[in-house]
Every structure is written in structure tokens, then in C-alpha cells.
Image (spheres, rainbow, N blue to C red):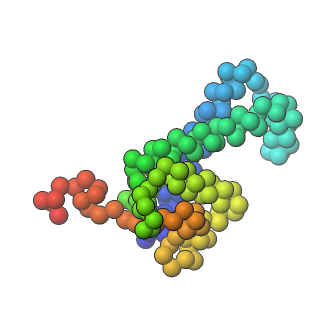
Amino acid sequence: MILLLRAVAGVFDLGITGGLAAGMFYLAMHVFGLKYPPRYWNYWDYLVDIINLHPLFVYLALGAIVLAVLIYAFVGMFVRGSVGLFVTGLEVRPGGRGILMYMRLVLRYILFLAGMALAGLPLYGIIWSNGRRGPHDWITGVEVRRRTVQERGTPREAV
């Protein structure tokens, strides 16, 4: 069950981060007055034309991704992990090595995105590890657990 919840949380997190990055990229393009080249049927040719049209496109895209990761990790400080984990009832806890700090969340999320770009490596780690920890969890020294009823905000009398 936790594997399914983590998969849903991962898809949710990728969607939010991708939307944030795309929105910031689109806004920056309009601020700089850049125009898209004509669309081709071949996606890769289109991507190469965008990069060749103006190198600023690459920097804007990378900057948008970095800014989205920093914003998302900042929000993660308040929801104990990420929005996707919060929605699915999971949380990130430090594995006995201090408190859950901002830079640990930034590194965790960068490793998650890099692993997803490399054929979904976090998913394979979560499937085959005994503790259901992905490489991004193992490297940053955190564990993903279910929140208890009291931590979800339910009154103690209802338990």
C-alpha cells in the first residue's frame, strides 16, 4: 500500500514542479520578448531549434527548474516532505541524523528529479528495498512514514 501511495505522491510532485517550472519559463519568455520557433512534427528537432534560436532559452529553463525546486522544498518544510506526500498521508522524517532541514529537502528533491530523468530510478529503489526507501531517501538519510491520526489533525477524542 505504501508503494502505491509513494507512486501517487511522486506523480503529484512531478506535476506540481513541472507546472511551476513551465509557468516561470513562460513568464520569463514574455518578459524577455522571446518567441517560439514554428512547431515541427518531430519533438527533438523542435527542441534543438529552440536551443539554437537563443541560448537564453536553456538558461531560463534551468533557472525555472531550480527556482521551482527551491520553492517546493520550502513548502516541504511546513508539510514534512512534499505536497504529494502530504496529500497521500505520508511524511518525511530524519533517520536519526538531526532535524529535517531545508537543504536536506532541496537535495532530496533534486536527487528525486534527477532519478526520474534517468528512467525512474527512485521507483526501482522503492520497489526493491526492504524499507521502501528510494535512493534519494537513502542518500539524504531520511525515512518516509505514514502520519499518525493525531498528526493529521484529528481531535484526540475521536480516536
Q: Residue 8 placed where, x, y %?
A: 49, 59
In the rendered image, the quadrant that contains the N terminus is bottom left
Above or below residue 88? Residue 56 is above
The quarter of the picture where residue 127 lies is bottom right
Residue 39 visible: no
Q: Residue at x 76, y 37 (%)?
A: 58
Left or right: where does residue 93 sit relative to residue 23?
Answer: left
* Residue 45 in the image, given as x and y percentages of width and height: 86, 43
Task: Residue at 17% x, 64% y: name it.
Answer: 159
> What x and y, as percent, mark residue 84?
46, 53
For residue 57, which quarter of the picture? top right
Q: Nearer the viewer, residue 15 or 122?
A: 122
Residue 128 to residue 74: above or below: below
Q: Can residue 77 be seen here?
A: yes
Front-lying residue, 146 or 47: 146
Give the quarter of the image for residue 151.
bottom left
Q: Position of residue 20 (x, y in %)?
A: 57, 38
Q: Residue furthest bottom?
A: 130
Residue at 17%, 55% (x, y): give it. Answer: 155
> From the viewer's perspective, is 33 left or right of 108?
right
142 sits to left or right of 64: left
